[in-house]
Image: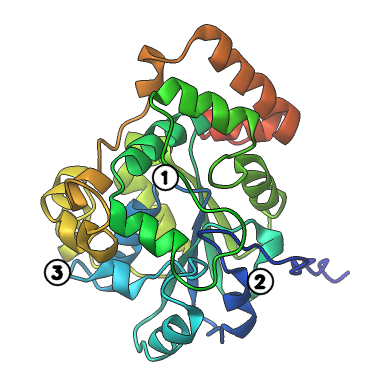
Amino acid sequence: MEPEKPEWPRKTRELHSHHFDSTIWNDFDFRDDDIVIATYMKSGTTWVQQIVSQLIFNGEEGLPVPEMSPWMDLRVPPKEIKLPEVESQTHRRFVKTHLPVDALVFSPQAKYIYIGRDGRDVLWSLYNHHVNANDKWYEALNDTPGRVGPPIGRPAETVGQYFRDWLEKDGFPFWSLWENVRTWWQIRRLPNVMLAHFAALKADMPGEMRRIAAFLDIPIDESRWGAIVEHCTFDYMKAHAAASVPLGGAFWDGGAETFLHKGTNGRWHETLSAEDSAAYEQRAVAELGPDCARWLKTGEMPTR
């Protein structure tokens, strides 16, 4: 009896906003060894891009990772500029997306790594990202040609209010956490999809790096392993932040070091009320189901 063939995801919609232009994937010419790093956002994307770059390039330093691994569906620069740049790359490509699965063109040959993180931790990192954004950031998102929908505005004065707006308005002023996580969770058993988690990376980064390498079929040069791991630590990335974040951090007050803020979990415990936290957890279960909600919170996969 032949094994059942996977049912591959199909694109069913486009997403446009101050950030998104999902149509770029319609014209993306996949290679069989492409790697797509996916997250909701502020969930360890830059960290996993660094890990993948170090695995591919065997611990080489000074790699311009944001240029090598662009956010494909970010609408600036436009796809007319971005696609030729990615097509000209001769190394194994590793690009990033923040789209839900049903807004992507999905390749059965490419490898997909999706990173999860508790939404409350995401929100605390996102607030830092937004509150420190400078005028160049707003101009790029709001004033360049091609924006669909309303502009993005300034954040709420407090992180608590920012959190409540985000939860009550389903991802405001960005996009929905729930639909993003839900679509990736639904395809977690496909042979070319790997789910990773921010908490697991914090607990055992070398172990998770080996798991990523195995998934990507990248052999590890043990003589370089110490350097590869060191180059993926938060302290190393913070010290070399200009090479790790988009445009060297030019869109944020304080530069690249602001983008790589703390790299920690649990900061919301000090600020978020018990009622707000409970509202988040109830919403997570309602939107995702208990197994996925537990994974998003802890990184623990169901045993059954």
The residue to which callout 3 is attached is 62
For the C terminus, give its image quadrant: top right
Report the mark closest to the observer, 1 or 3.
1
Q: Residue at x 55, y 66 (%)?
A: 147
Q: CA distance from mark 3 to mark 2?
A: 31 Å
Q: Nearer the viewer, residue 195 or 104?
A: 104
Q: Nearer the viewer, residue 223 or 31?
A: 31
Mark 1 in CB contact with mark 2 (< 8 angstroms): no
Q: Position of residue 156 (x, y in %)?
A: 43, 30
Query: Is the residue marked by circle 3 packed among few (<14), some (14-19), or many (20+) residues within 10 Å?
Result: few
For the N terminus, give its image quadrant: bottom right
Label total for image? 3
Q: Position of residue 261 (x, y in %)?
A: 25, 39
The residue to which callout 1 is attached is 42
Q: Earlier in the sequence, mark 3 or mark 2?
A: 3
Q: CA distance from mark 1 to mark 3?
A: 23 Å
Q: Position of residue 79 (x, y in %)?
A: 50, 80
Q: CA distance from mark 1 to mark 2?
A: 23 Å
- Regarding residue 302, the answer to whether it shows in the image is no
Residue type (three-letter) at the residue carrying disc 3: Gly
Q: Nearer the viewer, residue 225 or 136?
A: 136
Q: Nearer the viewer, residue 228 or 221?
A: 228
Q: Residue at x 56, y 83 (%)?
A: 28
In the rendered image, which quarter is residue 288 located in?
Answer: top right
Q: Residue at x 54, y 46 (%)?
A: 174
In the rendered image, which quarter is residue 244 located in?
Answer: bottom left
Residue type (three-letter) at the residue carrying disc 2: Phe
Mark 3, secondary structure of its residue: loop
Mark 2, secondary structure of its residue: loop
The residue to which callout 2 is attached is 106
Mark 1, secondary structure of its residue: loop
Residue type (three-letter) at the residue carrying disc 1: Lys
